[in-house]
Amino acid sequence: MPLNIPDNLPAVEILQNENIFVMRETRAMHQDIRPLHIVILNLMPLKITTETHLLRMLSNTPLQVEITLIYTKMHITKNTPKEHLDMFYKTFDDIKQH
């Protein structure tokens, strides 16, 4: 089953080139399947590389999986552009009601 991940996440293209089925967020919204929701707190310095590794491992499940990436709002990253965090990551405060 596919991983539901944000449309422009850099890992999408890498995983598709490895023949791993990912479903972009906009397409997943139109599916009539309730996915398993997983929140990933990515504390690794190379976040984009880590995202790709984690998503590769999670893709081997028969379930449809929806991923939410979070980070600690107090941490200032040195190796990942702030724009990447702003676009693809949330804080715990953003998701705690879910």
Image (cartoon, rainbow, N blue to C red):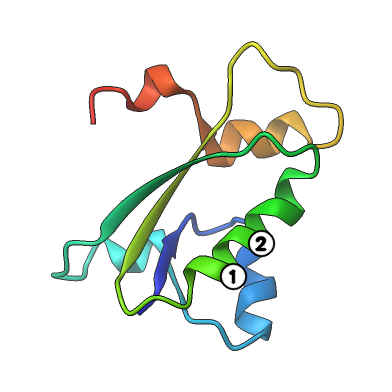
Q: Residue at x 58, y 28 (%)?
A: 71
- Counting labels gives 2
Identify which residue, 84 or 96, lies in the foreground.
96
The quadrant holding residue 74 is top right
Say few, some or many: other residues with alpha carbon within 10 Å of mark 2 (under 14 / 14 to 19 / 20 or more). Answer: some
Q: Amino acid at mark 1?
A: Arg
Q: Is residue 90 left or right of residue 28?
A: right
Residue 68, horizontal then vertical, whole percent: 43, 44
Residue 48, horizontal then vertical, whole percent: 72, 51
Q: Amino acid at mark 2?
A: Thr
Circle 1 residue: 56
The quadrant holding residue 54 is bottom right
Circle 2 residue: 52
Q: Residue 43: give its label.
A: none
Q: Is residue 60 left or right of residue 27?
A: right
Looking at this rendering, what residue extends furthest in the left direction? 32
Looking at this rendering, what residue extends furthest in the right direction? 78
Q: Residue at x 64, y 34 (%)?
A: 85
Where does the N terminus fall, quadrant-wise? bottom left
Position of 15 relative to 37 (above/below): below
Say few, some or many: other residues with alpha carbon within 10 Å of mark 1 (under 14 / 14 to 19 / 20 or more). Answer: some
Position of 48 relative to 65 (above/below): above
Residue 52, horizontal then vertical, whole percent: 66, 61
Q: Residue at x 56, y 63 (%)?
A: 55
Task: Assess whether mark 2 and mark 1 are in contact (beta carbons under 8 angstroms).
Answer: yes
Identify which residue, 48 or 60, lies in the foreground.
60
For label 2, the SS is: helix
For label 1, the SS is: helix
Q: Residue at x 43, y 22 (%)?
A: 92
Q: Is residue 9 left or right of residue 37?
A: right
Where does the C terminus fall, quadrant-wise? top left
Q: CA distance from mark 1 to mark 2?
A: 6 Å
